[in-house]
Image (cartoon, rainbow, N blue to C red):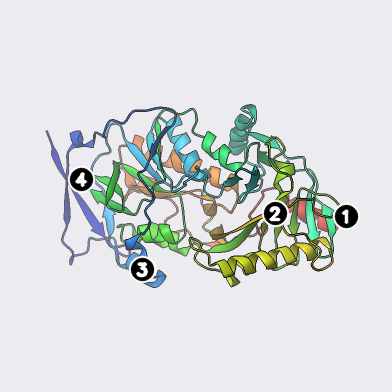
Amino acid sequence: MSCCTTTHFMSPFISQPLKTPKTLTLIFHPKSFQFNKIPQFHPILMQAQKKPTRRKPYGSSRRSILKKSFTQEQVVFSAPVSDDPEVGIIGGGMSGLICALFLEKRGVRSTVFDTGLRGLGGRMGTRFIEPKNFVFDHAAQFFTVTDPSFADLVNGWIEKGLVRQWHGTVGELEPGGRFVELPASPPRYIAVQGMRLLADSILSETNKIKVVRPCWISTIEPYNGMWHLSENGKPQGQFDTIVIAHNGKCANRLLASSGLPLIAKQMKTLELSSIWALLASFDDSLPMEYPFEGAFVKGMDALSWMGNNSEKLSSIESAPNCWTFFSTAAFGKKNKVPQENIPSVTAEKVTTQMLAAVEIALGLPEGSLKKPIYSRVQLWGAALPTNTPAVPCIFDPQGRTGICGDWLLGSSLEAAALSGIAMANQIADFLQSGGTRPDEFAVGLQNEFQLIQGSGIGQFPGLETQKQVNHVTV
């Protein structure tokens, strides 16, 4: 038995179907919605054959992508959702992982696609350098908790030994070595074994979630009432609903000809900063008048944060004096290069300038800082959002596609988790309705953006207020 359904492409600017393009008819067969049987374990991890070395479709400029986004026509699914729907989640950072976790809590299956070679997590990154046992949290450094829903998650991670409160000294550092310690409240939290292992553990006790990595979804196509995902021509499954849980130029290119103009427009309105990370290990402790484990650096172009991973991650058997240094966004913009292929001359220049900034920040004589025994620079080309629509998630029920990510609410791990939760509940409610009342579930498609306030390495809810109070007291 089969039935026929019609999918219309609608203009994003008018409510009636365009007359010029022909109607695209999609044949809907309920029985065809059966997915290939894949052996399951907790979680299911499917290794893609290899990471693509060249993404041919990704040659468009931002201007051409923008033009395509505003001229494409809206895809509209009218077929009922399948009896056992599955969601495809593109991006395995905090937001995508939490979305998958909460979809399972609502009884919905999902597959998470992530490009990570070493693990999940996105900006929850940790580098383990063997055989020297160098360990670096090279993206998210710590997080705070203010929302009850996020607090429930964090308490569960604490009970499992994945997260603990960070009692190390953290403060603000000004050039010349002047250090002002921040109050212990609100509590600061870190992943015991590094941020990446926390990300890898989030889905460890699930049975409705598959993880595919490394996998770079390059095409999303509506066909036969479903979204079909592929990686450079290789099919990666079909899904009732999809979630874009990453951002930047790759997400923009993915959406450029997707049939989702409203989703694409919101994603393209997002602005992101670029930040350099310098990972360095020293034979001896850094000379400082007031020992600290983390510091927000003020008044320096090449330095906005410095953190001692060896002290912070003391439970890991690691080499001493492993530090993570972050530049400012202004420095990142000034020295921006293709992050996938950093020229050696740029790497050397950035390393030299950032180490010189460390000297100045600590008040050390020029040239006195000993050369690190190990160093590596990484450019986070899409590091932090600078604007936000201030909505937990975005969902286009006509195109059955959503967006989640920290940038929808701010620039913190808490914001990322809350966005994932909201996205999961929005999709679960939509699927439970059978997809027959789509207009009731549209969210975030027209929200205007506003600037984000926060530190140079993101927001830490509750901490900003304390920093302001501390400044007044001083």
| Label 1 secondary element | loop
Drawn side of residue 404 relative to residue 351, left or right: left
Residue 60, which numbered label?
Answer: 3
| Label 2 secondary element | loop
Kindly report which numbered mark, 3 or 4, lies closer to the viewer in this rendering.
3
Q: Are marks 3 and 2 in contact (CB under 8 Å)?
A: no
Question: What whole-number distance in Å separates the C-alpha atoms at marks 4 and 2?
Answer: 57 Å
Can you identify the residue that label 4 sits on?
A: 224
Which sits earlier in the primary sequence, circle 4 or circle 1? 4
30 shown above or below 327: above
| Front-lying residue, 38 or 348 | 348
Percent of width and height locating residue 41 = 41, 27
Kindly report which numbered mark, 4 or 2, lies closer to the viewer in this rendering.
2
Drawn side of residue 136 relative to residue 341, left or right: right
Q: Residues within 10 Å of mark 1 (few under 14, many from 20)?
A: few
Report whether residue 262 is seen.
no
Can you identify the residue that label 1 sits on?
A: 289
Kindly report which numbered mark, 1 or 2, lies closer to the viewer in this rendering.
2
